[in-house]
Amino acid sequence: MLFLFKREFDFAIRICAYLAGLYPEEIIPINSLSKKLLITKPYTTKLVYKLKKAGIIGTEQGVNGGVFLNVPPGKLSLFDILSAVGLSKTTSECITEDNFCPLPAPCKIHSFFMEEETRLLNKLRKRKISGFAFTDSDFKKKTSNNYSLNIKE
Amino acid sequence: MLFLFKREFDFAIRICAYLAGLYPEEIIPINSLSKKLLITKPYTTKLVYKLKKAGIIGTEQGVNGGVFLNVPPGKLSLFDILSAVGLSKTTSECITEDNFCPLPAPCKIHSFFMEEETRLLNKLRKRKISGFAFTDSDFKKKTSNNYSLNIKE
DNA sequence: TTATACTATACAAATTTAGTATAGTATTAG
DNA sequence: CTAATACTATACTAAATTTGTATAGTATAA
C-alpha cells in the first residue's frame, strides 16, 4: 500500500470517481457498484454510509434505488472524500501531545513534517474528483461482465 | 500522530539529530541516550541496532562505550534514516498488486498518490540531519536531569 | 574478572485497519 | 397489499501493523 494511503481511502476515492463518471444522469445500486469496483459488498456499504453522512453521496431506496454523487464533481475535492471516511482522526495528534518530544515545541523535526502534511492536505483540497472520473469504457478488458445501470427517472 | 509518520520514524530521527549535535567529538551510552530522549531503553536499543546495521551509527563496546554518528551530519538525509528503520516495506506495494484496482494501470488515482509519494521521498532525500541537530541547551527546562557524557578518546 | 555496554533475535501487548453480520426501515412493482 | 429489493445503522470479529519487552549472549576496559 502506498506510504500515504490506506485501503479505505483508495476505495472511497474509487467509488466517488466512478459515480462522478455517471453524474448527473445515472444511479447504481450498491450491489452493482461493489461488483464493478471489486470492493466487497459490506465494505462498499460501510463506505457509502459514511459518504452519505457527509452529504457527498445521495441515495434512493426501493426496488429501483441506488446511489449517486450528490455534489458536482468539479466541486468535490479529494480532501472532502478522505475527511468523510476519517482523515482527521489520523492527523497531527503528535503536536498536541505534550511530553512526547523532549524539545520545546515546535521542534524542527515536527515542524518539518507538519509543513509537509499541510502541503499535502492543500493539494488534496485543490484536486477535484472530476479529474479522476472514469466510466465503463475505462475498465480492464478481462472484467468483461457488464452490469446494467438504471437510468434515473 | 502525524499523517505521514509513525513513532518509530520520529524516534529514529530524534536519535540521529541528537547524535548530530554531539558529532564528531562525543559518544553517549544507549542508557543515557534513552533517558535523555524519552525513549524506552529496549526501544532505543532496537533502533540503534537497525541504524548501526545501516552504517549510520557507530558503537564502542566496553565500560566507557556508547554510540555515535558514523556519517557527517551534512551527508545524512532523513531518507537514509527512515530507510534504515524500514521505509521501503510500506512503500508502493499497491502498484505491484495486480487485480487490486479495476482500472488499467496506471490509473489516475494511484498515479496521483505515487507522484505525491515521490515528491515527498525526494524531499526526504534532500533534507540532511544537520538541519535538525540539537544539543543539551535546546531541551525543555523541566527536563533538568543532566546525564554526563563521555568524551571520546 | 567483573561491571558495563552493545548484539541479535524472539516474543507479547496494544492499536489500527479491514472486513462481516444482522436486525431494521423505506420504496415500489406487480 | 405484499414481497422483493435496496438502503440504514450499528455491533462485532479477524487480520495486520505497530509498539514495546525480554533474554541470552558477546565485547571491552577499568
Image: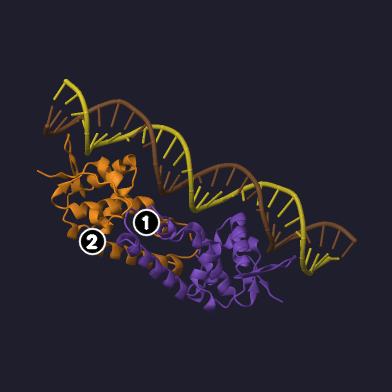
Chain colours: A purple, B orange, C yellow, D brown
Q: Position of residue A85 (x, y in %)?
A: 54, 62
Residue B100 in view here: no
- Relative side of B33 to A40, left or right: left
Circle 2 residues within 10 Å: few <14, some 14–19, many ≥20: many
Residue that badge 2 annotates: B128
User: Element under label 2?
Assistant: loop
Q: Position of residue A20 (x, y in %)?
A: 56, 73
Q: Nearer the viewer, residue C16 or A38?
A: C16
Dot 1 or dot 2: first in sequence order is: 1
Circle 1 residues within 10 Å: few <14, some 14–19, many ≥20: some
Q: Position of residue B75 (x, y in %)?
A: 18, 59
What is the chain letter for disc 1? Answer: B
Tell me the CA gap for discs 1 and 2: 21 Å
- Relative side of A82 to A123, left or right: right
Residue that badge 1 annotates: B91
- Relative side of B144 to A30, left or right: left
State whether residue D18 is above or below residue B76.
above
Question: Do pointers 1 and 2 mark residues of a single chain?
Answer: yes
Amino acid marked by disc 1:
Thr
User: Element under label 1?
Assistant: loop
